[in-house]
Amino acid sequence: MKKNLKEKLHEIIFEADTPEGKLFDVLLLVAIVLSVLVVMVESVGSIQDRYASFFFYTEWAFTILFTIEYLLRLYSVRKPVSYAVSFFGMVDLLAILPTYLSFFIAGSQYLLVIRILRLMRIFRIFKLGHFLKEGYFIVKALQASRAKITVFLFFVLLMVTIIGAIMYVVEGGVNEGFSSIPKSIYWSIVTLTTVGFGDITPVTNLGQFLSAIVMMLGYAVIAVPTGIVSAEMMAKRPTSLNTQSCRTCGREGHEDDARYCKYCGASLNE
């Protein structure tokens, strides 16, 4: 059966199984890389002063190109709103908004580097199915462990609050860095996460002893969520996924033998 314009556009824009679709995606990736490089080079003051006009027109050329592409994506799917609020839909929108916002907010065009997120499509374009499958596997493991991680993070929040209050009592009278409980909590977060900026440091013996304990606790903070996610990953096994995109909701990640979208129930073969 002969495909209509919307079906043909969807096949080219969203799928990389045809020569036309793969060519479109490769050219799109090249355009994304070039546009990000232009934004990065423009941030160099000496170059920007010399080639300001070139950067201005180049940015607008890429923005117009990506705007047309975004509108075609909305046109080719059955439910444009579903695609617009999806992850890639939001990324595609954010990839063009900064240029238009530059009329109202000076310097906002530098946020165009968010376009680099669009390079995530490279896994689908070059059929790196193994990496794509593992990516979905990790996402599923994170989703399955979110309740445990939420409880753990809540416990950490209580812990840094208590530690901060204790350090304020110990150091507050003799150390200007611990001038308030919020600042002490900031110190406990920096220390517990083993970041250690060093902008606030304890000076009393008791404060330094407590700091050593917090530092050692920091390793547990790193290990616990890692263990939670690892356990979920061991309990699950990745399934074989393809890169077919649903024409109704625009989402990918379906099993090879799937006939209907597992997210919205629409037929994948129409």
Image (tube, rainbow, N blue to C red):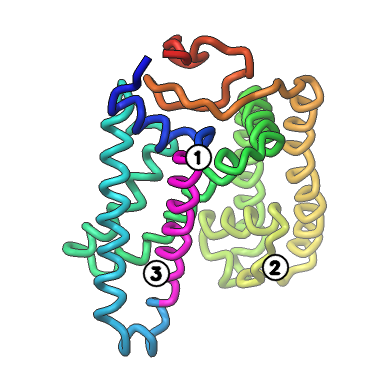
Image quadrant holding the N terminus, namely: top left
The three-letter amino acid code for the residue at tag 2 is Pro
Which residue is label 3 attached to? 39
Instruction: Indicate whether 186 appears above or below 258.
Output: below
Observer-side mark, 3 or 2, equals: 3
Task: Tell me how far mark 3 sits from mark 2, CA to CA.
Answer: 43 Å
Q: Choose between 189 and 267: the one closer to the eye.
A: 267
Q: Magenta: predominant secondary structure element?
A: helix
- Does any portion of residue 152 appear in the rendered image? no
Residue density around tag 3, few if under 14, some if 14–19, many if 20 or more, within 10 Å: many
Specify start and end residues of the magenta stretch as a single range.
20-41
Up-down relation of residue 192 to residue 177 (above or below): above
Q: Is residue 162 magenta?
A: no
How many dots with numbers? Answer: 3
* Three-letter residue code for mark 3: Val
The answer to whether residue 33 is seen in the rendering is: yes
- Give the secondary structure at mark 2: loop
Residue 53 lies left or right of residue 20; in this view the side is: left
Q: Position of residue 151 (x, y in %)?
A: 63, 28
Look at label 1 and name its amino acid.
Pro
Q: Which residue is mark 2?
A: 202
